[in-house]
Image: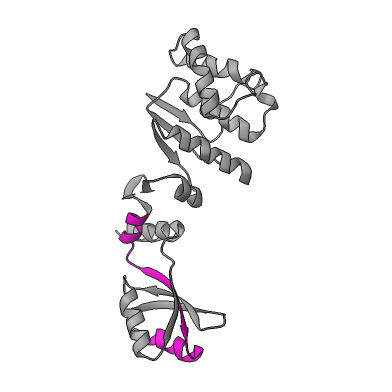
Amino acid sequence: KIGFLPETPPLYHDMTVADFIVHVGQLKGMSSSAAQKRLPEVIKLTHLEGWENRLISTLSHGYQKRVGIAQTIIHNPSLVILDEPISGLDPAQIVEMRDVIRGLSEERVILISSHNLSEISQTCDRLLVLQNGKLIAEGSEAQLANRVEDTRVKLTVRGDAQAWDEFLTKHTNVTSHTMEEGSFPSAAIELDGDHREQLTTDAIAAGFDIRHLESLDDELEEIFLGLMREGGSA
């Protein structure tokens, strides 16, 4: 019921794509005829049409990754585990691999293990964060963002830049801020909780007009680092 693809695909480079996939199917308990019958569907799912009779040794790294996924699903498992599936791929191959993974996820559960957070953000709809072998958080990206105590925003105002800097320095909910260059005073701000409404209300009361407010907490890297800090302190 499980298909697994390690970061480096386990391939026999002196075999053709079709022969290798059928061979792996037999290793997983399928009859030769059953593996041959399923082969066209697997070839289509992994976008390997036209490459069936090519030697694996002649394929690019991206296509070898696809063959690796093909051998992972030949026996039609309900759970597919992919370790760093985009490692070593160029930008065009990454986009193609995303399409392959999304196609696989329509009929089975896909578990991806990766340190590439931007790819996780674009591919996965549920995330699990591990620290020292223990699960410290799980949920959607939005749910994980809500768990992080600090809130980061970028706030741009109309007013005097020095006065804006002094206002942020004195505000009780601002733990740190970095002024940024621009036509209007702007700063990246870290709050000790979700005090965005209070900050903007206080800024207006202090005579600043709000030009732009942007949340910076939707960046998965920041969420991940925040959860790591929480896990470490716990």
Residue 83 image position (x, y, % from top left): 48, 37
Q: Residue at x 31, y 74 (%)?
A: 195
The answer to whether 43 is drawn above or below residue 147 in the figure is: above
Q: Nearer the viewer, residue 225 or 142?
A: 142
Number of labels in the image equals 0
Residue 68 image position (x, y, % from top left): 54, 28
Q: Is 196 on the left or on the right of 187, as rendered? A: left
Q: Which residues are magenta?
A: 142-170
Q: Is residue 25 magenta?
A: no
Res 132 seen here: no
Q: Residue at x 65, y 18 (%)?
A: 53
Q: Is 41 on the left or on the right of 196, as rendered? A: right
Residue 188 image position (x, y, % from top left): 47, 74
The answer to whether 136 is drawn above or below residue 174 in the figure is: above
Q: Nearer the viewer, residue 23 or 35?
A: 35
Residue 92 image position (x, y, % from top left): 62, 43
Q: Nearer the viewer, residue 158 or 97?
A: 158
Q: Is 211 on the left or on the right of 126, as rendered? A: right
Q: Residue at x 42, y 77 (%)?
A: 176
Q: Nearer the viewer, residue 170 or 146?
A: 146
Q: Residue at x 47, y 49 (%)?
A: 122
Q: The C terminus is located in which quarter? A: bottom left
Q: The N terminus is located in which quarter? A: top left
Q: How is the image coloured?
A: one colour
The answer to whether 60 is drawn above or below residue 157 in the figure is: above
The answer to whether 127 is drawn above or below residue 180 in the figure is: above
Res 163 seen here: yes
| Residue 48, quarter of picture | top right
